[in-house]
């Protein structure tokens, strides 16, 4: 793909999803580090550790762990629905993947843009990377690739999906980077008051985004609407009354609803993107109203409501706007990393802030704001951002403070080449390509034969699938290790 570039040990910048975070005080890069080298590049600031030559490995490990988690929940989620995305309300293991990515992007942005020699030039580079990442997301998740077990490709432009995982990350990256470049005051940070003054406008931006989200979600009126039932949202199933119609009406006429059919998040996406450009198999098809196998996909009950086949994008416009706040939280954690030099103080500040966010999320849930990843509700944002911070604290203490790095080396490698692993593993490009070579029947391919063999060996489809996925993660970790050994990294 022309938008991807292989970089070697030549001083290039870090890839967008794999922004390296080397030390601040060491002015010359070690072998294998990716830093800005020419005078017109964005100046990269590097976090100071106790040893000036020590690399901040925990962020790479965090990123790699998130990639591994994504592969686990995507490929083992069918065998273990409890770790798959929550059908609508609630939080499962899979629902932490996106916030983890966004949080990491925020932390990385605070390190990369601590010192910027030319703000217009830095902004131009940010905009270019945002566009390239967004386009790559459309290519990978817009419908062109049909995934594993489907040996075909191509998409009708009139039905292409515009939003997705990389698109949301690109939006968060854009907001965090612009705020860091243009809205960080030039105050010297020598006290808590100076710290607040320096980053006041960034905190204000986060609060305004959250307030705007609440006003729209609870204030806008959602009228009745209808959608077309097509082969995109119909699945092989027993005929159900009403689903044979070419159109289906959804009765709403409400304000402030957070239920699947009548929320403002879906309304805005239908108005701005169009019904045909949304995700056609949303998670609420796994709710009790829509699936007899809930929390897994399955045939609808006989009394299933018509909206069960309605499209909804879990990475829509308004929810992605709210998701940028998670990036801003990561940005704040990065500021602590930059300005606080003592390990113990960093851990204390991060822990206090993380616990505050987590508790605030639970308080909001008790107050009536449900946890919902598809809507990216305020309670969901607080809890997942708080858990992201706590996980960073744990990894930072283990990997960078105690230098317990060898057991984490697989995740470190994966984190240094996160973009290519996401495309090849999480988006099924590699498995889909391998499945294209089969013996007589498409089912007789290396991927499916290996999975069936492991399932037979464990005498369990469920646990055999889990072992297969763990071996898949190990495989991609070793691939990332090979790329790292060759000093090869993939970037936009």
Image (cartoon, rainbow, N blue to C red):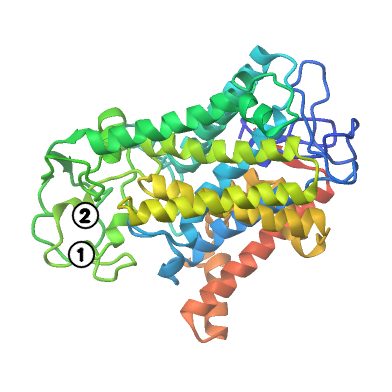
User: Picture quarter containing residue 251?
Assistant: top left
Total count of labels: 2
Q: Residue furthest bottom?
A: 459
Residue at (47, 77) in percent of width and height: 462
Q: Position of residue 19 (x, y in %)?
A: 70, 38
- The residue beneath circle 1 is 300
Horizontal side of residue 286 vs 108, given as left or right: left
Residue at (65, 29) in percent of width and height: 193
In the rendered view, tell whether residue 82 sits above or below residue 149: below
Q: Position of residue 131 (x, y in %)?
A: 54, 26
The secondary structure type at the circle numbered 1 is loop
> Which sits in the foreground, 355 or 479?
355
Residue at (64, 69) in percent of width and height: 471
The C terminus is located in which quarter?
A: top right
Q: Position of residue 236 (x, y in %)?
A: 25, 61
Horizontal side of residue 267 vs 194, given as left or right: left
Alpha-carbon distance for marks 1 and 2? 8 Å
The N terminus is located in which quarter?
A: top right
> Which sits in the foreground, 244 or 150?
244
- The residue beneath circle 2 is 308
> Which sits in the foreground, 421 or 47?
47
Residue 178 visible = yes
Q: Residues within 10 Å of mark 2 (few under 14, many from 20)?
A: many
> Which sits in the foreground, 123 or 243?
123
Q: Are marks 1 and 2 in contact (CB under 8 Å)?
A: yes
Q: Position of residue 117 (x, y in %)?
A: 75, 16
């Amino acid at each position: 793909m022309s938008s991807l570039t292989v970089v070697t040990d030549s001083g290039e910048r870090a890839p967008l999803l794999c922004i390296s975070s080397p030390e601040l005080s060491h002015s010359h890069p070690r072998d294998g580090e990716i830093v800005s080298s020419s005078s017109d590049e964005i100046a990269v600031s590097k976090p100071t550790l106790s040893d000036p030559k020590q690399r901040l490995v925990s962020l790479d490990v965090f990123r790699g762990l998130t990639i591994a988690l994504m592969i686990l929940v995507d490929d083992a989620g069918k065998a273990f629905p409890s770790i798959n995305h929550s059908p609508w309300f609630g939080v499962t293991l899979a629902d932490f993947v996106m916030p983890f990515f966004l949080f990491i992007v925020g932390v990385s942005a605070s390190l990369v843009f601590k010192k910027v020699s030319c703000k217009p030039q830095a902004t131009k580079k940010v905009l270019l990377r945002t566009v390239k990442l967004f386009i790559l997301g459309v290519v990978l998740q817009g419908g062109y690739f049909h995934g594993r077990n489907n040996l075909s490709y191509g998409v009708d432009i009139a039905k292409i999906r515009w939003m997705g995982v990389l698109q949301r990350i690109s939006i968060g990256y854009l907001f965090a980077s612009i705020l860091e470049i243009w809205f960080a005051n030039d105050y010297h940070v020598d006290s808590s008051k100076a710290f607040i003054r320096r980053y006041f406008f960034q905190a204000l931006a986060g609060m305004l985004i959250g307030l705007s989200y609440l006003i729209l979600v609870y204030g806008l009126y959602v009228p009745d609407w209808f959608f077309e039932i097509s082969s995109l949202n119909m699945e092989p199933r027993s005929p159900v009354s009403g689903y044979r119609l070419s159109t289906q009406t959804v009765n709403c006429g409400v304000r402030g609803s957070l239920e699947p059919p009548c929320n403002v998040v879906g309304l805005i996406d239908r108005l701005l993107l169009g019904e045909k450009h949304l995700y056609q198999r949303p998670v609420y098809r796994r709710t009790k109203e829509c699936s007899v196998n809930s929390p897994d996909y399955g045939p609808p009950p006989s009394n299933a409501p018509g909206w069960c086949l309605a499209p909804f994008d879990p990475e829509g416009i308004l929810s992605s706007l709210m998701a940028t706040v998670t990036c801003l939280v990561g940005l704040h954690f990065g500021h602590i990393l930059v300005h606080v030099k003592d390990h113990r103080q960093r851990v204390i500040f991060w822990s206090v802030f993380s616990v505050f966010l987590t508790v605030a999320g639970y308080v909001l849930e008790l107050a009536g704001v449900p946890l919902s990843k598809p809507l990216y509700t305020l309670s969901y944002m607080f809890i997942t951002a708080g858990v992201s911070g706590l996980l960073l604290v744990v990894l930072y203490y283990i990997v960078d403070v105690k230098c317990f790095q060898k057991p984490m080396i697989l995740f470190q490698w994966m984190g240094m080449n996160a973009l290519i692993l996401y495309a090849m593993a999480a988006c099924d490009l590699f498995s889909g390509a391998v499945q294209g070579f089969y013996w007589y029947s498409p089912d007789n391919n290396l991927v499916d034969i290996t999975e069936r063999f492991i399932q037979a060996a464990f005498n369990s489809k469920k646990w055999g699938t889990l072992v297969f996925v763990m071996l898949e993660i190990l495989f991609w970790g070793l691939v990332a290790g090979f790329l790292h050994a060759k000093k090869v990294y993939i970037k936009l």
